[in-house]
Amino acid sequence: MTTPQRAEPAPESGDVGDCADVVVVGGGLAGLGAALTLGRARRSVLVVDAGHPRNAPAAHSHGYLTRDGTPPLELLRLGRQEVRGYGGRIVEGTVEIIMRLDDGRFRLTTREGTCHLARRVLVTTGLVDQYPHIPGLHERWGRDVVHCPYCFGWEHRDRALAVLGTGPGAATQALMWRQWSEDVVLFQHTAPEPTEEQLARLAARGVTVVPGEVEAIEVSEDRVAGVRLASGEVQPREVIVIGPRFESRHELLDPLGVKVVEHPLGIGRQVEADPSGFTGVPGVWVAGNVLDVTAGVMQSAASGVTAAAALNADLTADDAERAVLAR
């Protein structure tokens, strides 16, 4: 665990009433879901967001009940509007430092040079996708280079799919995507050779396995056209499926002493916290992909709501204690 950052003296002026009950770092669905709940709980809440959501390249968000197919940026616009309707404040910025003060509050400093005070902090900064540096992948990411069948499977159903093997879960991933298309090819690339049992299952489901490393993704007329192997052979494909590693954006939290752990499926790292998102560090919660790197849009929004309820309960107890001391 990282050694907690040294506390600094609290500012000479200002009291609890001069700072937000909660500052939410990150304004995606997890952050906005939390801010909406806190606003409805009559808490003062400030959302600081850089405006660069992970799913921005995607044309639509899927699986979000009553909003299926809505563009990601439109979901955020609607969410911001609702948060503001309950008095929540949203400012553009990138938080670079979270410092615990001697009085237990937090001071958040942004790259732009602004500072915000908070009684509690909720970090919902998402994750970073780590995938192979193969020409063509990055440019098509979120369109016809995808990773999640529940997010993109329906839209790419019955198309010629290429599963790019990069780890031991490649065969399982290919079998999963077989649910959406009968034309699935597993390119072994850097993944271990499938076991005999895996080969038998792949063959039974009609999934072809192609050995050798992939050199590039062929693109024609603004769409994936095929996969080029190191041998020079090009196999026509329409969609590339990858299995990235996921790294939650936890750098802001490291100096506070949070713990980062491997996801149980071995697919990335995330902040260790209880089901409410409480990190074990007093006053610090997480939600969304910082908490669970596998969370989709609905799970992320829900985790924000869960964290907000826990934050409000914690603040309620603190309010009561302060009232007793004042009396």
Image: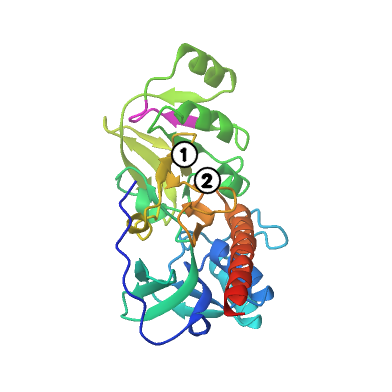
In the orientation shown, which residue stands out farthest toward the top?
A: 196
Q: Are marks 1 and 2 in contact (CB under 8 Å)?
A: yes
Residue 12, disc: none
Which quarter of the picture shows residue 89?
A: bottom right
- Residue 28 screen position, x and y as percent: 52, 65
Residue at 52% in and 25% down: 207
SS at mark 2 in the image: loop
Which residue carries the number 2 mark?
Answer: 294
Alpha-carbon neighbours of circle 1 within 10 Å: few (<14), some, or many (≥20)? some
Alpha-carbon neighbours of circle 2 within 10 Å: few (<14), some, or many (≥20)? some
Nearer-N-terminus badge (1/2)? 1
Q: Is residue 65 left or right of residue 286?
A: right
Amino acid at dot 2: Thr
Amino acid at dot 1: His
Q: Is residue 212 left or right of residue 126?
A: left
**Magenta stretch in the rendered image:** 185-191
Query: Looking at the rendering, in which quadrant would you find the C terminus?
Result: bottom right
Which quarter of the picture shows residue 54?
A: bottom left
